Image: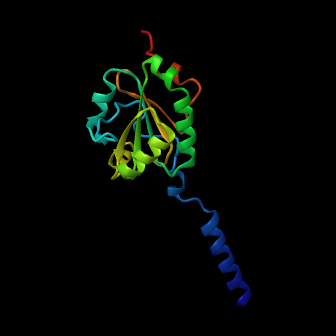
Amino acid sequence: MRFSLKWFWALSVAALIFIPYPAQGQFAFDENPLLNKQAPDFKLKTLTGESMSLSQFRGDEPTIIFFWATWCPHCREELKTLGKNAAAIQKTGIKILLVDIEESAKQVKAFVDKYNVPFTVFLDEKSEVAEQYSLIGVPTLFFIDKEGVIIAMEHELPANYVEMLKPVKK
């Protein structure tokens, strides 16, 4: 009896560990339900205290929305990359919009001032926009074309970002 009871428990534990459950396949970290859809508009306060919407900010220009936080080391690296490319990005007409998640204006301003961040910063203090965009983590960049459609989502600035945002000739 002891022998079969040991085997029963061993097999039970093995089944719990190795049998796949449907939920295990739910997490496609690079797929976002908003891809190839119109970017949801939102209105947030900027770091300067002005209330502004995505549509006001971007107009009809291609835009990169960068979701980030000051505590995130990978976000800092991406900000450096964006900062180094700021002049080149500006020449292309692509707008860069930074959305800081769950941090106070005071905290974000200190960071932006210290590192000379050259972009408009929106404050998503309650993560409402992050939730609207089905964000899983930071850093996350959304690439929005001139028509307002999200054409890509990445976790770092790809080398071909300008090509990605060029209008398709019809």
Instruction: Identify which residue is drawn at 42% across, 18% down.
Output: 93
Given residues 60 and 121, the one toward you in this image is 121
Residue farthest toward the bottom in the current orientation of the protein: 1
Instruction: Identify which residue is drawn at 32% across, 36% down.
Output: 40
Quadrant assignment, res 33: top left
Quadrant assignment, res 109: top left
Quadrant assignment, res 9: bottom right
* Number of numbered discs: 0
Question: Visible in this render: residue 132?
Answer: no
Instruction: Identify which residue is drawn at 33% across, 53% down.
Output: 126
Given residues 83 and 137, the one toward you in this image is 83
Given residues 152 and 25, the one toward you in this image is 152
Residue farthest toward the right in the current orientation of the protein: 3
**Picture coordinates of residue 17, whole percent (x, y):** 63, 66
**Picture coordinates of residue 77, whole percent (x, y):** 58, 40
Image position of 169 (left or right of 11): left
Residue farthest toward the front in the current orientation of the protein: 114
- Does 70 sit above or below residue 167? below
- Does 89 sit above or below residue 50? above
**Picture coordinates of residue 149, whole percent (x, y):** 38, 27
Q: Quadrant of the C terminus?
A: top left
Q: Quadrant of the N terminus?
A: bottom right
Question: Visible in this render: residue 167?
Answer: yes
**Picture coordinates of residue 143, whole percent (x, y):** 45, 30
Instruction: Identify which residue is drawn at 60% across, 69% down.
Output: 16
